[in-house]
Amino acid sequence: PRKIIIDTDPGIDDAVAIAAALFDERLDIRLFTTVAGNVSVDKVTKNLLKLLAFWNKGVPVAIGSDRPLLREAINASDIHGSTGMDGYEFPKSKYELLTKNHAVIEMYKVLMESKGKTTIVGIGPLTNIALLLRIYPECVERIEELVIMGGSLGRGNYGVLSEFNIAADPEAAKIVFESKIPLTMVSLDVGEKALVLPEVRDQIQKMNKTGDMISQLFHYYRGGNSDTGLKMYDGCAIAYLLEPEMFEVKEAYVAVETQGMLTAGATLVDLDGYLGNATNCRVCVDIDEEQFREWFLEAIQKCE
Ligand code: BDR
Ligand code: CA
């Protein structure tokens, strides 16, 4: 199986991604790291530990950055609820899974100590990953690929042109995009097409324990407004690892806007080479919606 580290801010769509990754035998999750994003780092860590208690899984969890590199934290509690994962009565968090060290140190240790290379999956703001690359540049050679959910080809979901994970910490995103590591960007544009429609939500409710839990969270996602479908942004990052043929991918140079008065956090996906720079990213520009729906159902089916 492919060795991965998941850097996350659960988050209802993060919970779906985590479920899909934990129960797929093609993936071996070596470490979870948490980052302030959808809500505070304390809350997202608690949520992750609750999920791991729910499934009785023993993957180590390292607490990461409690704020962006330079800016004040933003949050998405309007989408995920004030706890970041409203809507289900979970068992108590498994605090015994917490590691001693900060997420960045634990990531470094996993990268350096694992046999072969490890993939990092970033489904929150990029603060921890930027710090990792700056503090331990030697670990770049140990990273097979960095797959992030973040950025957009055009419009945003946080600002007019900015997607939430990049808008939350544009300076961190800039460091990551300029780092020359093998980078794949699972964009907002594909996430918006990766929909769970009400009938699919009802279908998973009856499937198993996980399907029931996820469908209950879905009743709170976006304030319960699920008629037009719920967007599985972070799930797409896991779908990309497992079934990349589901996506249309283009190589491009991607720049992160950090200076714009109105556009900080925008990603400029230079598909036509206007900026004259070498490509630095594989960008998922489209997704087969039907294949995603089937993958999602199969992924939940595999869970307990
Ligand atoms: C991203 O923002 C968060 O709210 C989601 O969990 C996802 O990672 C989508 O823009
Ligand atoms: Ca997320």
Image (cartoon, grey):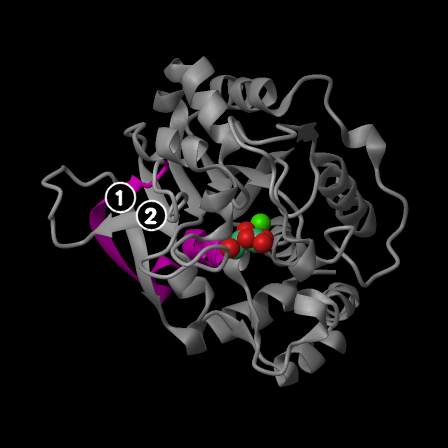
The quarter of the picture where the C terminus appears is bottom right
Q: Is residue 173 above or below residue 156?
A: above
Question: Which three-letter amino acid code belongs to the residue tagged 1?
Answer: Val
Q: Of discs 2 and 1, which sits in the foreground?
A: 2
Tell whether position 241 is magenta. yes
Give percent across and percent down for residue 41.
Answer: 69, 36
Mark pair 2, 1: CA separation? 6 Å
Q: Mark 1 or mark 2, which is nearer the start of the sequence?
A: 1
**Mark 2 residue element:** strand
Is residue 109 in view from this perspective? yes
The type of residue carrying mark 2 is Thr
The verdict on label 1 being within 8 Å of ligand 1 is: no
Residue under the point 64% across and 63% down: 302
Q: Residues within 10 Å of mark 1 (few under 14, many from 20)?
A: many
Q: Is residue 94 left or right of residue 27?
A: right
- Compared to 147, does 77 lie above or below? below
Among the 4 quarters of the image, the one containing residue 296: bottom right
**Residue 66: x percent and y percent?**
65, 30
Q: Position of residue 141 (x, y in %)?
A: 34, 22
Range of magenta residues: 236-258
Mark 2 = which residue? 267
- Seen in the picture, residue 30 relative to 57 is either above or below; the reply is above
Q: Is residue 1 visible?
A: no
Q: Could you say which is closer to the camera, residue 115 or residue 108?
A: 108
Of 86 and 163, nearer the camera is 163
The answer to whether the residues at label 2 and label 1 have Cβ atoms under 8 Å apart is yes
Residue at screen point 42% across, 52% down:
162
Q: Position of residue 271 (x, y in %)?
A: 18, 54
Residue plotted at (74% across, 55% down): 85
Please give the residue where the numbered disc 1 appears in the rendered image: 254
Residue 68 lies left or right of residue 100; in this view the side is left
Which residue corresponds to the image point at 59% horizontal and 80% vertical from the top-left? Answer: 197
